[in-house]
Amino acid sequence: MDPVKYMFGKWVYGYSVTMSVAGLLGLDPGRTLWLIGSGFGETAMMIHRSTGARVNGFELIPALVERGNIRVAGRGLAGKIHFYHLPHLFQMDCSYCDAALFESILCFVDAPENLFLRVVDCLKTGCRIGVVELIWTQEPTHCDLANLHQLFGGDITPKKYVDWENFFTTKNLKVVVKSVRKIGLLRKFWQDVSEAPFTTMSNLVKTWYRLAGSPKDREAWKSFRSLYILFGEKLGVGCFVLEK
């Protein structure tokens, strides 16, 4: 799986989307969050800074796990945040998990139900689970599916909003909060600036610097823009807070 194409699933919406869900999970310095789909670690660090909670991140791409651990070590957070390759989750001691947050990961894995239920089993009754996932807001055509798979490398299977809601209720989980967020390039930019202005502007400068010198990065940027052009009205972000 191409890490850049995989990360499109997290980059199409702003940090404030995930942070708003994380803010409803009851996190504090005495609790541990499992962040499933931790990417390169930015969300984990933001959640730790805002709540003081310890974060264990689990990521599908080994290279992103390594990058995340290097980043937190460089910021002196290695004792509070750690990243693992996703299969390691099935070996973890259940007592470590006080709350969980899935971020754009369930539509990329081969057996999303197995992953989801493993995490739910590790939560105590009354604990909360957050889910942030790309969803279809309209019925996709065959052309939509072909275009989406081309952009993401054929490794993504979004569900419809109602399918997620039905899935959660059949697992005896209470849906506490639910919403659908629209996607859009300007919307993402303002969400990021409002939530993390320094990080956003720093990343923007780095992005333009890479685009100036790398044809591969320019091609990735074109694909990223194409996602909004092709799917701005057909894809959205489903946000759920569940209670066990």
Image: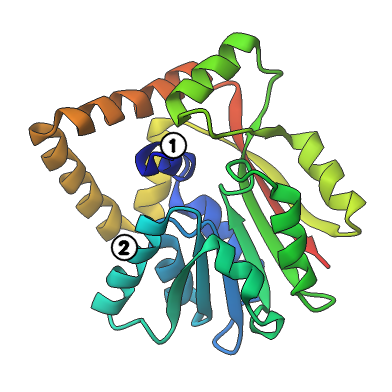
Identify the residue shown where x is 58% and y is 42%: 108
**Looking at the image, is mark 2 or mark 1 earlier in the sequence?**
2
- 217 or 131: nearer the eye? 217
- 92 or 220: nearer the eye? 92
The amino acid at mark 2 is Arg
Identify the residue shown where x is 51% and y is 75%: 55
Task: List x then y, in percent, for residue 112.
Answer: 70, 48
Compared with 241, 10 (above or below) is above
Identify the residue shown where x is 83% and y is 51%: 168
Task: List x then y, in percent, for residue 164.
Answer: 77, 42
Question: Which residue is denoted by mark 1 in the rendering?
Answer: 187
In the rendered image, which quarter contains the N terminus?
Answer: top left
Q: Residues within 10 Å of mark 1 (few under 14, many from 20)?
A: few
Q: Residue furthest bottom?
A: 30
- 207 or 153: nearer the eye? 153
Question: Which residue is denoted by mark 2 in the rendering?
Answer: 67
Relative horizontal placement of residue 180, taking residue 202 as reference (left or right): right
Residue 113, visible in the rendered structure: yes
Compared with 183, 233 (above or below) is above
Q: Nearer the viewer, mark 2 or mark 1?
A: 2
In the rendered image, which quarter contains the C terminus?
Answer: bottom right
